[in-house]
Image: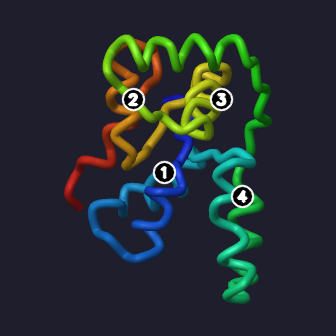
Amino acid sequence: MSSVLIDSSVWIEYFRGNKEYLFITELIKANSICTNDIILTELLPSMIQKKEKNLVELMNSIIKYDIEIIWNELQNLQLLNLRYGNNNVPVTDLIIAQNCLQNNLSIAARDKHFKLMSEYIPIKIYDGAVRKV
């Protein structure tokens, strides 16, 4: 199995104890999760503010894939989104999709943009997010 990039939307549900997202525990045990700087930037400031030092350390210990932005590629991804009616995809989601494609990663995300993109872009959606535990 390729590594699974856990989007911040899924992490938030996992931290809230949402049972639908307990599959993350299985991925952690299998050492199959990864992150990037966008996701960490979305999550860490709140954790630091709440003084969740152990959680910050754990998040920083996850395998992190560097983000290599290729702007022409992002523009092409956005053009495909527009052509398929997937409007208003945030640039951050495009960068995350590009990061997955560059590193052959699956993604676990709640954002509908990723599922829609997977219909015309070869991004792999991790289906564990739909399992009930």
**Upstream in sequence: badge 1 or badge 4:** 1
The three-letter amino acid code for the residue at tag 3 is: Asn
User: In terms of secondary structure, where does tag 4 sit?
Assistant: helix
Residue identifier under label 2: 87
User: In terms of secondary structure, where does tag 1 sit?
Assistant: helix
Q: Position of residue 118 (x, y in %)?
A: 38, 22
- Is residue 18 positioned above or below 132 on the image? below
**Upstream in sequence: badge 3 or badge 4:** 4
User: In terms of secondary structure, where does tag 3 sit?
Assistant: helix
Q: Position of residue 1 (x, y in %)?
A: 49, 30
Please name the residue shown 79% across and 26% down the image: 68
**Gap in angstroms between the C-alphas marked 2 and 1:** 31 Å
Left or right of 78, for residue 82:
left
Question: In this orientation, which residue lies closer to the viewer: 112 or 15?
Answer: 112
User: In terms of secondary structure, where does tag 2 sit?
Assistant: loop
The three-letter amino acid code for the residue at tag 1 is: Leu
Which mark, residue 41? Answer: 4
Residue identifier under label 3: 99
Left or right of 56, for residue 124:
left
